[in-house]
Amino acid sequence: MPYVKGRSEAFTRILKFHSIATANRPHKMLGNFVVHLKNKVKDEEKTELIYRVPCKNCSSSYVGEMGRKFSLSIKEHKKEVDSFTGGTQTRASRARERCVTHKSAITDHAMEENHVIDWDKAKVVDREAQRQTRWIKEALWIRKTPMCMDRDAGSYQLSHTWDQVISRSRAISSCKQSRRDQDVRRTSKCCH
């Protein structure tokens, strides 16, 4: 128990009378005063992760996994999208491009829907060092994302047994979000 001068001694005597041993520790310790700073790793530098890239024009998102740096993955996706959407195109060239399956589902979405990808809102949604577990998490995130532009269900074939659990977790998170929105509205009404 924490040591309080004058009180701890009396309390120890009372407990000792009842055959209860006590140990006191200082209330303030050096560790409480020394700041343990740890540099926060930026998303761009993180590795072994699952990420989401949204579309600016619709509510679709791409979910992917990468063992390498997040910034490298985004750079590769962006380079491919820009190579197909960067220049001016005729209707005929755009029609030819729609028939081609591109390296990335993001490029397919940008070309087929004529949409712009929101690279600034791309973010890391989960991290996992073990590749197999990361593949499972990616499959869960793909299944969990309502308007997912991914072509497949991910590297791991997730059983549809998980669908009920995923839909429940989606419902719970949307319920929590609506509560947060209501709380924000209430506090903004009170403050104005």
Image (tube, grey):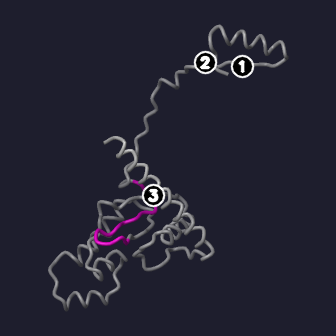
Dividing the picture into quarters, in which one does residue 136 lie? bottom right
- The amino acid on which the numbered mark 2 sits, given as a three-letter code, is Pro
Residue plotted at (60% across, 67% down): 165
Q: Looking at the picture, does residue 159 appear above or below residue 136?
A: below
Residue plotted at (45% across, 58% down): 178
Disc marking residue 23: 1
Residue on which disc 3 sits: 178
Q: Earlier in the sequence, mark 1 or mark 3?
A: 1
- The amino acid on which the numbered mark 3 sits, given as a three-letter code, is Ser
- The amino acid on which the numbered mark 1 sits, given as a three-letter code, is Ala
Residue plotted at (19% across, 92% down): 92
Secondary element under disc 3, as helix, strand or loop, is: helix
Residue found at the very far top of the displayed protein? 6
Residue plotted at (48% across, 23% down): 33
Residue on which disc 2 sits: 26
Image location (x, y in percent) of residue 125:
45, 59
Image location (x, y in percent) of residue 134:
52, 64
Viewer-proximal residue, 47 or 123? Answer: 123
Viewer-proximal residue, 140 or 65? Answer: 140
Which span is picked out in magenta? 46-60
